[in-house]
Image (cartoon, coloured by chain):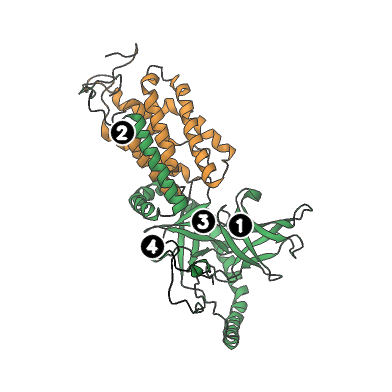
Chain colours: A green, B orange
Amino acid sequence: MALDSIGSNPPPFFRQGLSALSKLVLFGLLSVLLMAADHRLGVSQPIRSAVSLVLAPVQWLALLPQRGSSAVQDYFKGVDEARDAARQYQARTIAQAQRLQQAEQLLQENQHLRQLLDLRQDTAGPSRAVQVLYETADPYTHNIVIDKGALSGIAAGSAVVDVAGVVGQVTRVHPLSSEVTLLTDRDQSIPVLNARTGQRYIAMGDPTTLGGSLELRFVPASADLQEGDLLTTSGIDGVYPAGLQVGRVKQIDRRIDTAFAKVHATPMAQTRGRHMLVLAPVSDWPARPTKPEPAVRTRPGRGQASAPKTGASAPTGDKP
Amino acid sequence: MIMPAGRHLLLPANPRFILASLFLALLLNMLLGLSGQSWLPDVLALALVFWTIHQPHHVGMLTAFVLGVAMDVHESALLGQNALAYVCLSFMASMVHRRVLWFPVREQPLQLLPLFVAAAVVEWLTRLITHDAWPHWSQLLAPLLQTALWPLCSHLLLAPQRRPVERDDIRPL
């Protein structure tokens, strides 16, 4: 009971519960445990999903003002803008119509050639249109939250694209919403292909340079790269379908003292857009080659100590 | 009852009002977070500190922990990052709650500034240790703004307790 209020009952003398310090230790340790479970062990997904399910109505309520204001803005933007946009889209559709017709033929031709060469099919999986709910407020990560979740069939690892190119990847799936990590997040990486030369690189997110960009790592200083080169997904990861536009090389910094060049690229996708497309992971790997395995597996440190441990040191798993 | 001189005797706080104000603070915090500006004050932390100081038997570290986890999930931050900061904040508030109330409202913010700064430092350290990520300089503003908002928060949240004990419809004021 506070010092200066009329108390209906006196403060408890004996039933004080845990002391403040022990409460701090308890909840502090619980928080640290949660962090460890989240960061190191990666087992916190059920907790997150449960909390997000409880939080969903609150979030819906918190998003109401934003939705209202955007609706009002849309209304007052007027017909002119809508007409302009429609005209633009019409022009673009006409420009694309011819290419689209060619694409159909090229697709068939490509399929035929791939069959001839016995190559892997790179078919894009089913896609799903989603809407962006909000951008997360955590200043250390670049995430957005979309309005479809596990109940709508979103799978973790799916690529997210907009009109211009790849936006990011679905990293956490809750029942009613999902979190998409943008390409510019510091922990995000994407395999890319230089469309001009066909060389492959890995682009990592770099949230600080150029207001959010991609950094190509481990690029030899002598690599054939020019400013303005288009980077597309290479499709060798089994996650992103091949050929999606990722970004353009913005600046190349070749230094004498290192063997690697510092290459920065700007992402093509505009993350401020509201409508996006979630592409299911490609995941049609060729079947894993069957390897004749030894009939008896012995585990080191268990069972007979006198058994020869030759099998234990040999590599047992190989990555595809 | 010992209390500072020249202070009104307040009505007991309504637990439902406490709950509603914390819920509203959570909503407001989510709304502020949508703007993507990291210098905006953490309203939830402010409400939490206020109630920990004024009603330590109703609001404590358990509330802080639960609200912190909720914010973590909403922000998709590291799970436990906000929870740890809020629990530390609530602990420090419960340590100083007897002292702070002896000061007039305009001097209380100075007593609370170290609390908000310490909570922010806890959060930065967490991220520095786990992700090696430095905070943006604009985040330094948030604890200062929270401190500056304290008198306003204090007036708003104490208003229901300042009503007269007996309702008198004829009274002119």
Counting residues from the start of the chain, the first of labels 4 and 3 encountered is: 4
Q: Secondary structure at mark 2?
A: helix
The amino acid pointed to by label 2 is Ile
Query: Where does label 2 land, which residue?
Result: B18
Residue that carries the numbered disc 4 in the rendered image: A150
Residue A80 screen position, x and y as percent? 55, 58
Mark 3 sits on what residue? Answer: A181
Residue B159 in the image, given as x and y percentages of width and height? 33, 26
3D distance between C-alphas at marks 2 and 4 = 35 Å
Q: Is residue A123 above or below residue A213?
A: below
Asked if the residues shown at circle 2 and circle 3 are in contact, with their CB atoms under 8 angstroms apart, the answer is no
Answer with left or right where residue B68 lies relative to residue A81.
left
Single out the mark in the foreground, 1 or 3. 1
Question: Between disc 1 and disc 3, whose residue precedes?
Answer: 3
Mark 4 chain: A
Question: Residue A247 versus residue A237: which sits nearer the camera?
Answer: A237
Q: Quadrant of the C terminus of chain A?
A: bottom right
Bin the neighbour count of mark 2 within 10 Å (Cα to Cα): few under 14, some 14-19, many 20 and up.
Answer: some
Say what amino acid the circle numbered 4 marks: Ala
Tag nearer the camera, 2 or 4: 4
Residue assigned mark 1: A204
For mark 1, give the secondary structure.
strand
Circle 3: element type: strand
Which element is circle 4 on?
Answer: helix
Is the residue at mark 1 from the same chain as the one at mark 3?
yes
Identify which residue is drawn at 41% across, 20% down: B105
Q: CA distance from mark 2 to mark 3?
A: 36 Å
Amino acid type at image mark 3: Thr
